[in-house]
Every structure is written in structure tokens, then in C-alpha cells.
Image (cartoon, rainbow, N blue to C red):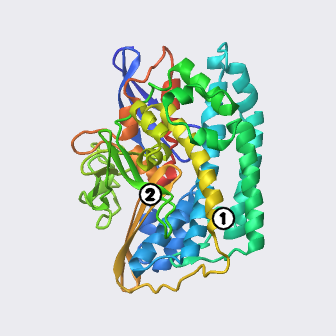
Amino acid sequence: MTGTTLLVGPFNRVEGDLEVRLEVADGEVTAAYCNSPLFRGFERMLLGKGPMDALTITPRICGICSISQSAAAAFALADLAGGGMAPEGAKVAALLHAVENLADHLTHFNLFFMPDFARQDYAGRDWHGRVVQRFTAMEGSALRRATEARARLLHIVGLLGGKWPHTLAIQPGGVTRAPSMRDKMRLGADLRAFRDYLEEQLFGAPIEAFASMDSLAALAAWETGDVAIFLEIAEDLGLQAMGQGAGRYLSFGAYPHDEGPVFARGLWRDGNLHPLKPGQIVEDLSHAWMLGEDAHPSTGQTLPDETMRESAYSWCKAPRLSGQTYETGALARQVVDGHPLARALAAEGGVRARVIGRLLEIALTQIALEQLLDDINPAERFMRDLRLPADGAGAGLVEAARGALGHWCTIENGRIASYQIIAPTTWNFSPRDKAGVPGPLEAALVGAAVGEGEETPLSVQHIVRSFDPCMVCTVH
């Protein structure tokens, strides 16, 4: 298979449109080019609108991570106003946001990732029959239990936010619903039910046992729940060495409130933790169908190049921090936060590491949610009055399930003059920059095995899904 080219896509069980062009030689990928082929233009839609309209419009970017978009917009407007949320409101906002991310992780593992291993391509493997029984689309017992548990978990958003997706509960000054003690009891029951599901099905053991693992040896010894099935598959297929990244990780910090974020912000590179300096972010346009100059998102523009010049191949811009690519997501959050197992996985950096990063964060987020709920005081105020100026700028940096999400807005004469968004998949699925450096997915695909006759290589699908792309967010 020397010197062939494959165009892979669209991918099923991926939010939005994705194409990947692969150059293949001697049975493996030698280069990859990631294309976000659908331009949506939400940043253009926001121009000229009132600032508060961002709270209504940006959550419509995506039906999966709408609370993430809502929180980023609210924090950007709070920054514009020079204030912040009422302390109790910030806790409720954090709780709402964490519930959405937790539900997203559960959906990814059960409905997006694991069904790939029920394929007939893997018939004859020792684990295949169990995977078919647990994870076959529409029929698997794990899928049914996961969707039931997810629905019960999202009841929390219904109670505090009125609906999901696209709740308007999170505002620059706090939240619109002040929970009562009775509400806390109902929310606590929902969280206990979700814990029961995790401990019976996903982990097959107390979540604290999984959350406290501190080494790859401890991980290898895990023998219960659906996690054990995944670990068996990973060992058999070599998922730990598949799709390895550059080892650079980025987190904006998750679920901020007065006591700080639940999961820390920062950068991890060269095996060390570094402070995050958002001012060093630049969006490179060299291989995007965009006009204008490379710029920090606070001064950038979204000007689509309708000629679709030949030197470009995606509607996605290429964000870089100090000129470097960074991977973002659950693994990145836990690496930056300092979890010992996550840092051991960071050195591994492949498909297994990303999936275990999400599973680890499921356990840690459940524990954090229980603490957040316990700390909420219904007797306090949940909303602070913030007045937006007629002119100014603000930024909202949060963590969606898939990673770092940033909103940057500029207001002139009471109207939005500029609104720029960098989503997690913009980081992970970016095209090359002017130096020819591939984005994180593009780099991770190099070396992926391509079998004789494979038009959509299985290894490529596993690597793509390990990043869990949301292409509609990528192109806003």
C-alpha cells in the first residue's frame, strides 16, 4: 500500500461533519489533514446584537454542550461588567455545568466509543461476545442502563435550569433559580441514584476506589465493571500506543467559584506544570478558509474566504499558544490538576489514556458534585446585579466536556462589535499552521495502521473518537 490517499468521512456517532484525508504508505498513515467542511457562522450572527443576546444565541451552537457555551458567555459578560457571580450562584452554575459534562462523558463512553468494538471485524476476540451484549447500538444492556442513568442525572438541570439543552439559568450575576432545602434533598437523591449506577455498572466498585488510583500498575489490576472490559480491549489491541499525542495539555480551569475552580487551570508540557497565559493565544489562518490576519481572539475576526483558496483545507482556524499545539479535554484537566494516574497516562498519551482520563473524571466529578451540593446555602443570595457598560471587552474561559472553551467579546455603543470563540475541538482538530505543524489529531493519526482494503481504517476511527470531536462547535 505505497503512496495511496484515503478520504475518510463523514464519521458516524460524531457531532457535525468531519473529513480526514490520509496519506498512506506501507500499511500506515504518514500524514493526515483534518477538514471541518461545514461553516456555520455564529460569530458573524452575533455582530450588532445586544450583549445579553449572547446568552441566548451561543448555547444554540451545540445541543450537547449548551451549558458550557452559556457559562462561557456569562463569564465573558461578567468580565465586561467588571464583576462576578454571587458566590452561591457560582456554586449552582458550577453544579449545572458539571452535570452536563458528566452526562457527556457517560454518553461518549457508552454510545460513541465502545460500540465500535461490537463490530464483526473483532469477532473471535475473547471479549467480543461481552461487548456485543453490552454495547451493541440500540440493544446493548450497558447502553440502556447508561441512558436511564443519564436521564435521571439531567433531571438536576431541569430542576435548576428549567430545561436542557439551552437553559438561560446562568447569568453574569449568578443564576435565576435559588434552590430551597427541599430542592437540595431532591438533587441529592438524583446524585445518589447516579452514584449507584456508576458503582453497579461502570466501575463495579466504589467510585472512590477508582478515583484514588495512583499508577498504571493499579489501573492494570482493575477487574470490575465496564471499565474492566475496556481495559481488556485496550491491552489486546494496543490502544495505549495508538494515537499518541505530543504530551502538551491545556486547561482553562473547570467550575470556578469563590474558593477557586474545582479543577485547576494551567499548562502541562515537557513533564512540568506551567501557568496559563491566555494573552499568548493566536489563531493561525494559513490553512483555514478565512481572510484577515493571525490574531489573538480578542482582536480576531471571522471573515470566510468564499473562494476557498487551494492552500487551505478547513473552515477551522488553528489556535496556538506561544506557537505550540495543545491537546485539551478530560485527560488534560486531570493532568493539570495533578492527579497521579492522569500524569502517568500523560506520558502514554494515546487512545487508552484519553478514555481513562474521561472515566477518571467521571468519578472525580461525581465526588465534586456531591460536595458542591452540600456547600450550597439556600439562605444566601444567588444573583448579583451587574450593569454592562456601553463600551468594553470581556473574556469567559471555561472547560466543556471536550476541553478548553473560550469566548471573547468586544462591545461598542451597547452592541457586540466582535465575538470570537475557540472551542475544544478547534484546538484538537485544527489544521496545520504557517510553519506546517499539524494539529493534535493530525499528528496523532501518523503511524495509525491501515489494513489491506480498509476504506475507513479501524485504528483511525478509534483515534478520532478518543478525542470525541464536536465539529459543530469547531466551526461555531
Q: Residues within 10 Å of mark 2 (few under 14, many from 20)?
A: many
**Percent x, y for residue 384?**
53, 83
**Percent x, y for residue 145?**
77, 41
Residue at 26%, 57% in the rendered image? 280
Q: Residues within 10 Å of mark 1 (few under 14, many from 20)?
A: few
**Which residue is the site of mark 1?**
374
Residue at 58%, 74% in the rendered image? 89
**Percent x, y for residue 21?**
40, 32
Q: Is residue 350 left or right of residue 68?
A: left
Quarter the N terminus occupies: top left
**Which residue is the site of mark 2?**
253
For the residue marked with disc 2, what is the amino acid? Gly
Q: Is residue 132 left or right of residue 357?
A: right
Is 168 located above or below residue 295 in the figure?
Answer: below
**Percent x, y for residue 151?**
74, 53
Task: Please report whichever mark, 2 or 1, sits nearer to the chain's N-terminal start.
Answer: 2
What label sits on residue 324 in the rendered view? none
Residue at 62%, 65% in the rendered image? 166
Q: Is residue 320 left or right of residue 419?
A: left
The residue lying toward the viewer, choosing from 332 and 404, is 332
Is 413 located above or below residue 357 in the figure?
Answer: below
C-alpha span from label 2 to label 1:
21 Å
The residue lying toward the viewer, choosing from 66 and 146, is 146
The residue lying toward the viewer, choosing from 93 and 11, is 93
Query: How many numbered markers are drawn?
Result: 2
For the residue marked with disc 1, what is the amino acid? Asp
Q: Is residue 237 left or right of residue 244?
A: right
In which quarter of the view is residue 374 placed? bottom right
